[in-house]
Amino acid sequence: MSPSAQARSFPRGPLIGAAVLVGLAMVSATLARVSGIGATQIPAATQVAISDLRFEDRSDGAVTIYAARTATVIDVLPPGSNGFVRGVLRGLARERKREHLGADIPVRLTRWSDGRLSVEDPSTGEAITLEAFGMTNAEAFARLLNLEKVTP
């Protein structure tokens, strides 16, 4: 090898060190994944309260909320109010429309033993954990859960 070619080659020590470092990182990640060391576990929560609700848009812009079990009206959201609830419902309705499903299947509102609140659409399998949007928004749905007071 000519002296000019030797001067331009990358030093072997740092290259070998980098390869060893990458190898150790991969082995460590694999061991952690397989053994569960360092993994954060979320304890399983149980359902504390469940309410199956059906929502119906009215011609005046209001939304009527029915308890699915009894088919009774539990609340009416006036036009221009409850923007977060309406936004979540629009998202669920969009998924149903995309899958060519009707609005007759109720939405499940669940309070969990760890304090979380979730909305699930059994027809599409979509679930939304409401605390991700802040406690004020979650309380808008918690109020609906308290109106019916249904437990599992």
Image (cartoon, helix red, strand yellow):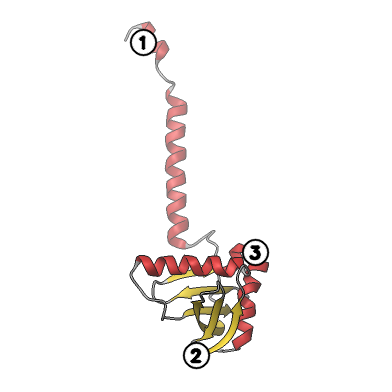
The residue under label 2 is which amino acid type? Answer: Ala
Q: Say how many tags the image has.
A: 3
Which residue is outermost to the right? 136
- Who is closer to the viewer here, 11 or 102? 102
**Residue type beneath disc 1:** Ala
What secondary structure is marked by label 2?
loop
Disc 3: which residue: 134
Q: Secondary structure at mark 1?
A: helix
Q: CA distance from mark 2 to mark 1?
A: 84 Å
Relative image position of residue 49 (x, y in whole percent):
57, 84
Residue 112 placement (x, y as % from top left) = 58, 78
Distance of label 3 from label 2 (alpha carbons): 30 Å
> Which of the two discs, 3 and 1, sits closer to the camera?
3
Residue for point 63% across, 85% down: 147
Q: Position of residue 55 (x, y in %)?
A: 50, 78
What residue do we see at 58% from left, 79% from top?
111
Tag 3 and tag 2, C-beta contact below 8 Å: no
Residue 46 appears in view? no
Marks 2 and 1: which is nearer the front?
Answer: 2
Query: Which label number is shown at residue 121?
Result: none
Q: Residue furthest top?
A: 3
- What's the residue at 46%, 51% (across, down)? 29
- Residue 5: mark in rendering: 1
Residue situated in front as seen by the camera: 26 or 127: 127
Disc marking residue 71: 2
